[in-house]
Image (cartoon, grey):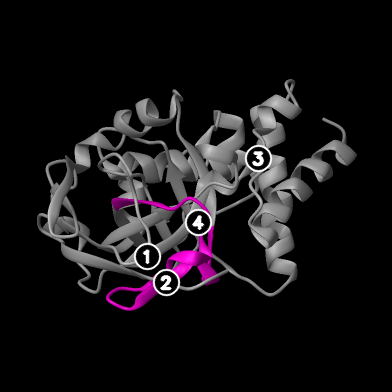
Amino acid sequence: MEATVLQAAAACLERAYETGELASPLIDTYPDITLEDAYRIQQRVVRGWVERGDTVRGHKVGLASVAMQRQFGVDQPDYGHLTASMFYLEHQPIPAGRFLQPRIEPEIAFVLGAELRGPGVTVADAARAVDFVLPALEIVDSRIKDWQISIVDTIADNASSGGVVLGSTPTKLGDVDLRLAGCVLHSGGAVAETGAGGAVLGSPINALVWLANTVGPLGVSLQPGHVVLPGSMTKSIPVSAGDTVVATIAGLGSVTAVFSGGTR
């Protein structure tokens, strides 16, 4: 796609962020759009945020589990950026009105203690780079109307990022088996979903390796102190004002997100 077309697509998503008016699927407007085009649109949007004062504080891997791929009709993972403005404290009210079509999903967050630069990153490299892990809830959101997303739509829309809630119980990587760590997601006190770490590309650490090796050729490295969300352990569920969602992950503890009213 030509630069002017990429800019027009990025501007369409930026308007949705600013006004709350949902966009039509990009795949409908630009039927020849490629994965590379979609990532270039994402980079333009994120660059605009940074120019206006936000800061990149990590990355996320999206659509890493079979459950999520089936839910949204895609067949591969993607990645997006996490910025400082996306992080919320657990147990503190999160204004639901800040989002357009929010859903939530449980994850095991990696906090890096060393740089990871691909290509060529192995599981051993990734394990050495992790300082600790935390239970996390990711708020996913879409600027595309009715979540009618193709893989290029979600990539261009920063992998449908919305927000992040981190738990407060850090655990060393060697103290938990990420593959076998079971998860129960409660909403309003009732069990909404169950899953395990093995649902995320066989193990969440594999998603970290995939991310480092995918962004490395683009000149991007994963930095110390950054948070990496490897992908959801279950299907995502919708949330709205008044909801309380708790993810309990074996060996890691729990994390709670509380949604309040409020407007954009």
Q: Look at discs 3 and 1 and give the one toward the viewer.
A: 1
Q: Residue 41 in the image: x percent, y percent?
A: 71, 43
Comparing labels 3 and 4, the label whose residue is closer to the camera:
3
Q: Can residue 117 be seen in this view?
A: no
- Mark closest to the chain's N terminus, 1 or 2: 1
- Picture coordinates of residue 214 (x, y %)? 53, 38
Q: Do the residues labelled 1 and 2 touch (CB within 8 Å)?
A: yes
What residue do we see at 64% from left, 29% from top? Answer: 35
Secondary structure beneath label 2: loop
Q: Is residue 204 left or right of residue 54?
A: left
N-term mark: 2 or 4: 4
Q: Do the residues labelled 4 and 1 touch (CB within 8 Å)?
A: no
Q: What residue type is labelled 3?
A: Tyr
The magenta segment: 82-106
Name the residue: 66% across, 46% down.
42
Q: Which quarter of the rendering shows the N terminus?
A: top right
- Answer whether residue 94 is magenta in the image: yes
Q: Name the residue under label 2.
A: 261
Please name the residue that numbered disc 4 is placed on: 222
**Residue receiving disc 1:** 241
Question: Looking at this view, is 126 or 40 the one in front?
Answer: 40
- Tell which tag, 4 or 1, sits nearer the viewer: 1
* Amino acid at circle 1: Ala
Q: Mark 3 points at which residue?
A: 39
Label 1 – label 2 distance at C-alpha:
5 Å
At 37% from the left edge and 41% from the top edge, which residue is drawn? Answer: 207
Q: Which amino acid, by three-letter code, is at mark 4?
A: Leu
How dense is the environment of label 1, judged by Cα within 10 Å: few (below 14), some, or many (20 and up)?
A: some
- If you read the primary sequence from the N terminus, does the residue marked by circle 3 or circle 1 appear first? 3
Q: Earlier in the sequence, mark 3 or mark 2?
A: 3
For image coordinates 41% across by 36% down, the residue present is 63
On the question of residue 153 being in view, the answer is yes
